[in-house]
Image (tube, grey):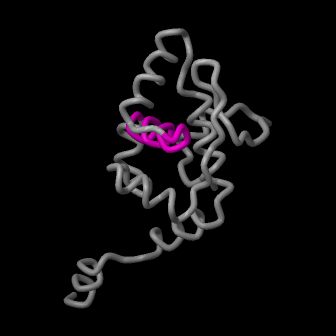
């Protein structure tokens, strides 16, 4: 199962995995979701493992991921994305690439499983007290 099933709506059935996206007629290579990328996302304010906040507002994830792929700061990425949208572009391609890269990442999949199976310390204490 994809780590973020809600993002799969942006991928067409039978589409092959893309490792790039295009914004304003410029092609950017997608970054792999490895340990360093996840740390970079965290340092830039995006917790990629917090599914509820991503579902509520995927826009910061898009801007931050695009900025890392562009090797630019978030403001530059935001300006490029804004121009892309104004000129008739959309988020679908980059969201599809993000989903593909998450699904492809062995590290991200292993980290996601670990996060799902870990029980917070508070929950362990509460269970013990019962």
| Residue beneath the point at 47% across and 58% down | 38
Across and down, in percent, residue 5 comes to 56, 46
Quadrant assignment, res 11: top right
Toward the top, the furthest residue is 87
Residue 103 as seen in the image, left or right of residue 35: right
* Residue depicted at x 43% and y 41%: 64
Total labels: the figure holds 0
Whether residue 7 is situated above or below residue 37 in the rendered picture: above
Image-quadrant location for residue 54: top left
Q: Is residue 125 left or right of residue 4?
A: left
In the displayed image of the protein, which residue is found farthest to the front?
72
Q: Nearer the viewer, residue 76 or 95?
A: 76
Q: Main secondary structure of the magenta part?
A: helix
Residue that appears at 58% across and 28% down = 92
Q: Residue at x 58, y 43 (%)?
A: 98
Left or right, 11 with respect to 87, comes to right
The quadrant of the image that shows the N terminus is bottom right
Residue 97 image position (x, y, % from top left): 63, 40
Q: Position of residue 87 (x, y in %)?
A: 52, 9
Pick the quarter of the image with the C terminus.
Answer: bottom left
Q: Residue 67: say if magenta.
A: yes
Q: Residue furthest bottom?
A: 128
In the rendered structure, which segment of residues is drawn in magenta?
Answer: 59-71
């Amino acid at each position: 199962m994809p780590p973020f099933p809600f993002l799969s709506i942006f991928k067409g059935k039978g589409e092959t995995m893309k490792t790039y996206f295009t914004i304003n007629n410029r092609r950017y290579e997608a970054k792999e979701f490895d340990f360093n990328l996840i740390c970079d996302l965290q340092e830039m304010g995006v917790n990629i493992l917090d599914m509820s906040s991503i579902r509520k507002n995927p826009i910061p994830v898009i801007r931050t991921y695009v900025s890392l792929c562009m090797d630019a700061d978030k403001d530059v990425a935001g300006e490029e994305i804004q121009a892309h949208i104004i000129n008739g572009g959309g988020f679908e391609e980059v969201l599809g690439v993000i989903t593909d890269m998450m699904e492809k990442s062995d590290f991200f999949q292993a980290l996601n499983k670990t996060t799902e199976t870990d029980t917070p310390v508070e929950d362990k204490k509460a269970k013990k007290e019962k």
